[in-house]
Image: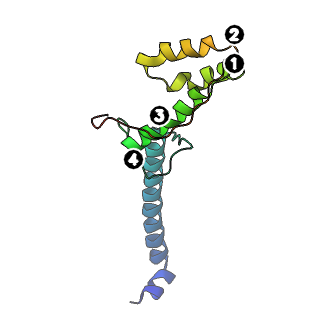
Amino acid sequence: MKLSDFLQTWDGHETENRFSRVIIIGLLVVCVITSLAAWRTERSIILVPPTLNKEVEVTRTSASSEFKESWGLFLAELLGNTTPANADFLKTAIEPLLAPDIYRSVLVMCQHFPGHTVKQLFAAIRSLRATNSR
């Protein structure tokens, strides 16, 4: 019997409906699994400093030395060009980026500027990094 003749009969329609139900249930299971996987996936936000010009690698626990150097130069320029007018802004901008061991000393430096008329200008000529940095 040909497939086209079989599908013309009532048994053919029932068989086609059962097959369609199995496919629909399979697709539903795939959709649920995909939804759960997307819901459980940790969201990540990637911040790229403006001085980045090389390909870098960033994982959950480490980053390439080029990435660290780029962030270091960016923060050095921010902090090096501090004026009394932008000291409060810099303090709030860099607070979340500072490591705990330098947090207090950098914030103390930013707090000294608003009452003074001192201005700093900074331009990086070169950067050096430790070879065993993490």
- Where is residue 45? Give x, y as percent: 52, 39
Disc assigned to residue 84: 1
As drawn, which residue projects farthest toward the left?
132
Report helix, strand or loop for mark 3: helix
Gap in Å between the C-alphas at discs 4 and 3? 16 Å
Tell me the crowding category of disc 1: few under 14, some 14 to 19, or many 20 or more residues within 10 angstroms, Cα based: some
Tell me the crowding category of disc 4: few under 14, some 14 to 19, or many 20 or more residues within 10 angstroms, Cα based: few
Disc assigned to residue 57: 4
Gap in Å between the C-alphas at discs 1 and 3? 22 Å
Q: Nearer the viewer, mark 1 or mark 4?
A: 1
Q: Does the rendering let one see residue 18?
A: yes
Q: Nearer the viewer, mark 2 or mark 3?
A: 2
Report helix, strand or loop for mark 4: loop
- For the C terminus, the quadrant is top left
Gap in Å between the C-alphas at discs 1 and 2? 7 Å
Amino acid type for the residue under numbered disc 3: Gly
> Earlier along the polypeptide chain: callout 2 or callout 3?
3
Gap in Å between the C-alphas at discs 1 and 4? 36 Å
Amino acid type for the residue under numbered disc 2: Gly
> Residue under circle 2?
115
Report helix, strand or loop for mark 1: loop
Residue 2: name its quadrant: bottom left
52 left or right of 22 in image:
right
Q: Are marks 4 and 2 in contact (CB under 8 Å)?
A: no
> Earlier along the polypeptide chain: callout 4 or callout 2?
4
> Earlier along the polypeptide chain: callout 1 or callout 2?
1
Q: Are marks 2 and 3 in contact (CB under 8 Å)?
A: no
Q: Nearer the viewer, residue 93 or 9?
A: 93
> Earlier along the polypeptide chain: callout 1 or callout 3?
3
Image point (56%, 36%), residue name: 123
Q: Are marks 1 and 2 in contact (CB under 8 Å)?
A: yes
